[in-house]
Image (cartoon, rainbow, N blue to C red):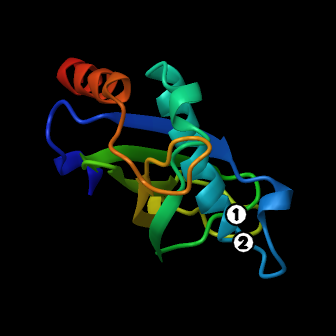
Amino acid sequence: MMSDLLPGAIRETVTRTVEWVDTDASGHHHNSFITRSVEAAEAQLFRRLGLLEEYFGTAPRVHQEVDFRSKLYFGQEATTVLEIESVGRSSMTFRFEVTGEAFDREGSAPIPRRLAASGRYVTVYVPRGTEESAPWPEAILEKLASAAVVG
């Protein structure tokens, strides 16, 4: 669980409501809701760090894994916690959890707060105008290091 992570971790939390468009014919969330929620947390994190322009458009995903644990329903709040797990020479590894908040579903028994999905993904720095990975720029590394110290 995220609660056992080291102090000083670079972390972002976003809460979103599962909308009708986020559900599919089975009556619960479509798996793309998880991806969009994680991406929203990623954007908020890099916006807060002042790295939105430097990061987006230069850091494609090269690996992603998701474990789906429980359903989310239309109208339910879902909280995403995203953390930078490690930063390599040219890669960055993230881990995340998406938790469905307690929810009183009309006509059904109340749903307790529970983990809906967890996973990891890796991005790689690819400078604009190129197709090859390269080391992270010092400006990005400095802001990440500063954020980790502040916690």
Q: Which of pointers 1 and 2 lies earlier in the amino acid sequence?
A: 2
Distance, label 1 to label 2, CA atoms, is 5 Å
Q: Is residue 8 left or right of residue 131?
A: left
Tell me: residue 19, above or below residue 110: above
Q: Quadrant of residue 105?
A: bottom right
Q: Nearer the viewer, residue 125 or 130?
A: 130
Q: Where does the image place residue 137, in percent across and percent down from the top left?
A: 36, 31
Contact between labelled residues 2 and 1, with CB atoms less than 8 Å apart: yes
- Residue at horizontal 45 percent and vertical 61 percent from the top: 114
- Which residue is identified by label 2? 28
**Horizontal placement of 70 versus 108: left or right?**
left
Q: Residue at x 43, y 35 (%)?
A: 12
Disc 1: CA contacts within 10 A as few (<14), some (14-19) or many (>=20): many
Q: Which quarter of the figure is the C terminus placed in?
A: top left
Instruction: Please tell me the numbered disc located at residue 73.
Output: 1
Question: In terms of secondary structure, where does tag 1 sit?
Answer: loop
Q: Residue at left 36%, top 22%?
A: 139
Mark 2 residue type = His
Quadrant position of residue 7: top left
From the viewer's side, name the closer residue of 44 and 16: 44
Q: Position of residue 43 (x, y in %)?
A: 57, 36
Camera-side residue: 34 or 94? 94
Q: Amino acid at mark 1?
A: Tyr
Name the image quarter holding the N terminus.
Answer: bottom left
> Label for residue 1?
none
Q: Is residue 116 visible?
A: no
Instruction: Please tell me how crowded label 2 is: few (under 14), some (14-19), or many (20+) other residues with Cα within 10 Å.
Output: some
Relative image position of residue 14 (x, y in whole percent): 54, 38
